[in-house]
Amino acid sequence: MPFEGRMSHSGLAMCYEQGIGTEVDLVQAYKYYDLEDPAGAPDKRRLEEMMTPEQIQEAIRLSREWQEEHGVFVPSYYGLEYQPDGSFK
């Protein structure tokens, strides 16, 4: 489900979490919840209980990739920082 600016990140996360218009995908749901509230929303905590550590790390990686691809910087408690070359690390 592509993001086209028509729905909020939390709306997309809910669609992936509940399988609305798509298959249930907790990794994608977590990614969009992370983009909405990287500091640790209750939604992310709830999903973490159903996910493996590897799935969580994959979701975080996808969140970072999305930010780089779209030129958006969302401060994160995972240490993602804007770099002088325009990337995030």
Image (spheres, rainbow, N blue to C red):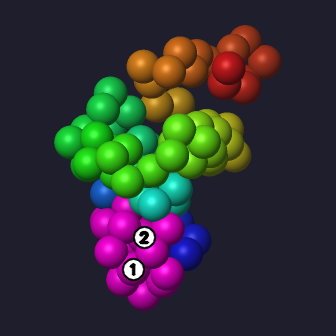
Q: Amino acid at mark 2?
A: Tyr
**Residue in the image at 26% along x and 48% along y:** 46
The secondary element bearing badge 2 is classed as helix
Element marked by disc 1 = loop
Q: Quadrant of the N terminus?
A: bottom right
Residue with the mark numbered 2: 16
Residue 29 lies, with reference to residue 20, above or below; the image says: above
**Residue 72 seen:** no
Q: How far across and how far down the image is residue 5, in percent? A: 45, 65
Residue found at the very far bottom of the displayed protein: 21
Q: Which mark is residue 75?
A: none
At x 49%, y 81%, the residue is 23
**Magenta region:** 11-25
Q: Residues within 10 Å of mark 2 (few under 14, many from 20)?
A: many
Q: Is residue 84 visible?
A: yes
- Which quadrant would residue 18 be assigned to in this image? bottom left
Query: Badge 1 local density, few (<14 within 10 Å), some, or many (20+)?
Result: some
Q: Do labels 1 and 2 touch, CB within 8 Å? A: yes
Q: Residue at x 68, y 20 (%)?
A: 89
Q: Residue at x 37, y 67 (%)?
A: 17
Question: Residue most toward the right?
Answer: 85
Residue tagged 1: 19
Residue nearer the viewer, 7 or 33:
33
